[in-house]
Image: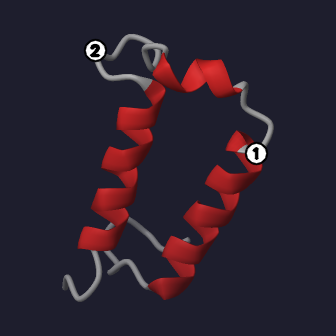
Amino acid sequence: MHSAEAAIDGEDVRRVVALAVEALRDADADAWEARAGTLEWTCRETLEHLADDLYGTRGAS
């Protein structure tokens, strides 16, 4: 991954998605509606938010 000062590129997004899929592949289906740690959001809502953020980085400079 790049330093914090560098722009995010497609390779960064692909790496994050691959890591997320690996980590979440075996998640218990019932756990998706549980709170995400100390957040008020559920695990599903948190994942949706992260996906929106990654999608929103397209074309950002």
1 sits left or right of 49 in the view: right
Is residue 48 placed above or below 33 in the rendered structure? below
* Residue at the image point whose x is 43% and y is 69% from the top: 3
- Amino acid type, callout 1: Arg
Q: Position of residue 41 (x, y in %)?
A: 31, 22
Q: Position of residue 45 (x, y in %)?
A: 35, 35
User: Could you tell me which secondary element the residue under label 1 belongs to?
Assistant: loop
Is residue 49 placed above or below 6 in the rendered structure? above
Is residue 46 placed above or below 13 in the rendered structure? above
44 sits left or right of 27 in the view: left
14 sits left or right of 44 in the view: right
Is residue 22 placed above or below 55 in the rendered structure? above
The residues bearing labels 1 and 2 have C-alpha atoms spaced at a distance of 23 Å
Report the colour scheme: secondary structure
24 sits left or right of 44 in the view: right
Residue labelled with disc 2: 40
Quarter the N terminus occupies? bottom right
* Residue at the image point whose x is 43% and y is 14% from the top: 35
Q: Nearer the viewer, residue 16 or 24?
A: 24
Q: Nearer the viewer, residue 16 or 43?
A: 43
Q: Quadrant of residue 21?
A: bottom right
Name which of mark 1 and mark 2 comes first in the sequence.
Answer: 1
Residue labelled with disc 1: 25
Q: Are marks 1 and 2 in contact (CB under 8 Å)?
A: no
Q: Position of residue 12 (x, y in %)?
A: 52, 75
Q: Check disc 1: other Cα within 10 Å, few if <14, some if 14-19, many if 20+.
A: few
Q: Position of residue 14 (x, y in %)?
A: 58, 75
Q: Nearer the viewer, residue 2 or 56?
A: 56
User: Could you tell me which secondary element the residue under label 2 belongs to?
Assistant: loop
- Amino acid type, callout 2: Glu
